[in-house]
Image: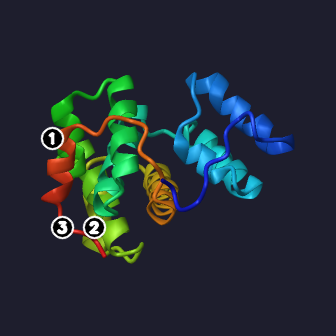
């Protein structure tokens, strides 16, 4: 059971009900993360606004999901590992790409650079080195995309921390291969 109690759509009112209804409409369900975040209208509104804004980034949906998986692994967030394993499959990632993302291993220079940079941002809390950043420029990742990688990392740290603090009940399947990949990934903190 969650430390922070989830709010079901039927219990919600006002802006919170509108936001949860929008999630229901978009996803066909309201994941427990959003039910927990609904305890604070400001938090759920901010979370949904941030997520909506990042969908317009130059990073592809696959790249954003790969970053999310990496960050969830670094922050030991089983909820987000499970959710982003499902979302990753929905945008075309196969199981091996999902597992590799958790381990900061990608195929191709671009995704390797993106994941290495996202890992550095997470582990070093943004205090990346010039060589960390140079990997991006070497892989032809633009300055705009570098900022978007930072934003996706931050968005996912927010959801990881909400779920870790709340002990949100996982309502997605966490594949054993992903759990095992996370277990073998050294914690950033």
Residue at the far right in the pictured view:
14
Whether residue 145 is visible to the viewer of this picture, yes or no, is yes
Q: Nearer the viewer, mark 1 or mark 2?
A: 1
Residue 100 drawn above or below residue 23? below
Query: Who's the residue at 28% across and 56% down the image?
Result: 73
Check disc 2 and report the residue beneath it: 132
Query: What percent of the width, then of the height, locates residue 12?
Result: 77, 41
* Cα distance in 3D space between marks 3 and 2: 18 Å
Residue 138 drawn above or below residue 20? below
Query: Who's the residue at 66% across and 23% down the image?
Result: 25
Q: Nearer the viewer, mark 3 or mark 2?
A: 3
Crowd around label 2: few <14 · some 14–19 · many ≥20 (10 Å): some
Query: What percent of the width, then of the height, locates residue 47?
Result: 63, 50
* Cα distance in 3D space between marks 1 and 2: 28 Å
The quarter of the picture where residue 133 lies is bottom left
* Residue 173 horizontal side relative to residue 32, left or right: left
Mark seen at residue 177:
1
Q: Nearer the viewer, residue 91 or 87?
A: 87
* Residue 166 horizontal side relative to residue 178, left or right: right
């Amino acid at each position: 059971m969650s430390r922070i109690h989830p709010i079901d759509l039927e219990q919600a009112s006002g802006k919170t009900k509108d936001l949860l209804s929008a999630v229901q409409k978009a996803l066909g369900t309201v994941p427990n993360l959003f039910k927990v975040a609904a305890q604070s209208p400001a938090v759920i509104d901010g979370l949904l606004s941030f997520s909506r804004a990042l969908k317009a980034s130059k990073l592809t949906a696959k790249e954003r999901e790969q970053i999310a998986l990496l960050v969830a692994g670094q922050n030991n967030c089983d909820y987000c590992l499970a959710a982003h394993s499902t979302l990753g499959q929905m945008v075309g990632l196969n199981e091996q790409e999902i597992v590799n993302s958790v381990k900061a291993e990608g195929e191709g220079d671009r995704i390797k650079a993106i994941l290495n940079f996202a890992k550095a941002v997470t582990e070093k809390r943004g205090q990346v080195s010039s060589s960390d950043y140079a990997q991006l420029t070497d892989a032809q990742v633009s300055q705009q995309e570098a900022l978007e990688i930072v934003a996706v990392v931050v968005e996912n740290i927010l959801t990881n921390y909400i779920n870790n603090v709340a002990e949100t009940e996982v309502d997605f399947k966490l594949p054993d291969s992903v759990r095992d990949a996370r277990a073998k990934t050294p914690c950033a903190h």
